[in-house]
Amino acid sequence: MSRAVEESNRAMLRARDAMDRAYAQPLDIAALARIAHVSEAHFIRTFRATFGETPHRYLQRRRVERAMYLLARSDEPVTEICHLVGFGSLGTFSRTFHGIVGESPSAYRRRRAAPADVPGCFTKAWMRPSAAGGEKATAVSGPAPSAAP
């Protein structure tokens, strides 16, 4: 890896770390580009090339991940969680949550309890939202049963 690519990756990591720390705050591309010491257009292109998604989509997914945790672990109203994770409107939060997770925040909360015999690491891997949006991980299983003659 060239030195220029390494420096670019470090700059993108600095911006992504800032997004992870301040996900609930209003963040704009200009501020993130300043953190990475690049122009706004270059930041968007490079972030997507580095992490496989736009900065906006990454921030939305990060906020939804936090909302999933809060929905599963607290009794806060959905509207309060919406604001705690940085969304300005319940409609945008619900639409984004549904687009990433595949169900509404309320439905997710109702279904949040995992079976007791499934290790937590598998549950977390299964429930983590994908970067592609709406697609869930597929279950790992053995070979398909053969049809009886």
Image (cartoon, grey):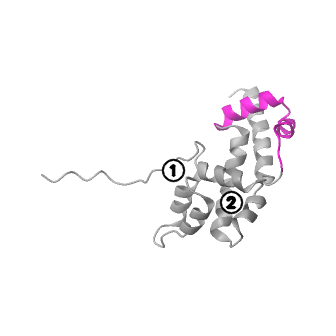
Which of 68/17 is in front? 68
Residue at 86% across / 33% down in the picture?
37
* Left/right of residue 9 with respect to residue 115 in the rendered view: right
Reading the image, the residue beneath label 1 is: 136
Residue 73: name its quadrant: bottom right
The answer to whether mark 1 and mark 2 are in CB contact below 8 A is no
The quadrant in which the N terminus is found is: top right
* Left/right of residue 29 with respect to residue 111 in the rendered view: right
Reading the image, the residue beneath label 2 is: 67
Q: Where does the magenta region start and end?
A: 26-52
Between the C-alphas of marks 1 and 2, the distance is: 17 Å
Which of 111/34 is in front? 111
Is-magenta flag for residue 48? yes
Residue 69 in percent (x, y) is at 66, 63
Residue type of the residue flagged with mark 1? Lys
> Could you tell me which secondary element the residue under label 1 belongs to?
loop
